[in-house]
Amino acid sequence: MTVSTALHPDDLRLLTSRFGLAGATPMTLEQLAAELGISREQVRWRETRALRAARSIPSLASRLSGDESASPRTPHDASKMTRLVF
């Protein structure tokens, strides 16, 4: 299963834009809110939900932590999302 099929397309788009994954330019909460037509708080909520979903995927959780042996329930630092490779 690939990341693009494991995450909802909206979550994948949000994380890619927010953290500048796959060569995208990182966007602020304000920029994403304006682009999506929602509030900054809604962007923050969706980001949290998307990160939680990403961490629940065992193969992705190990990439997020930088440790191939990481458990999917291990807490991860959101800044490590930049290690994710699509």
Image (cartoon, rainbow, N blue to C red):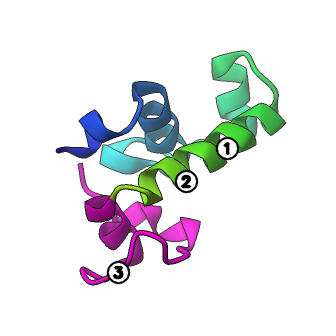
The picture quadrant where one finds residue 67 is: bottom left
User: From which residue to which does the magenta span run?
Assistant: 58-86
Give amino acid for label 2.
Answer: Arg
Tag 1 residue: 28
The picture quadrant where one finds residue 72 is: bottom left
Marker count (numbered): 3
Q: Secondary structure at mark 2?
A: helix
Q: CA distance from mark 3 to mark 2?
A: 15 Å
Q: Which callout, 1 or 3, points to the residue nearer the camera?
A: 3
Q: Which callout, 1 or 2, points to the residue nearer the camera?
A: 2
Tag 3 residue: 70
Residue shown at 31%/68% (left/top)? 63
Residue 75 lies, in percent from the top left, at 55, 75
Residue 79 among magenta residues: yes
Residue 69 higher or lower than 53, as above or below: below
The picture quadrant where one finds residue 84 is: bottom left
Give amino acid for label 3.
Answer: Ala
Residue 78 lies, in percent from the top left, at 56, 65
Q: Secondary structure at mark 1?
A: loop
Residue 12 among magenta residues: no
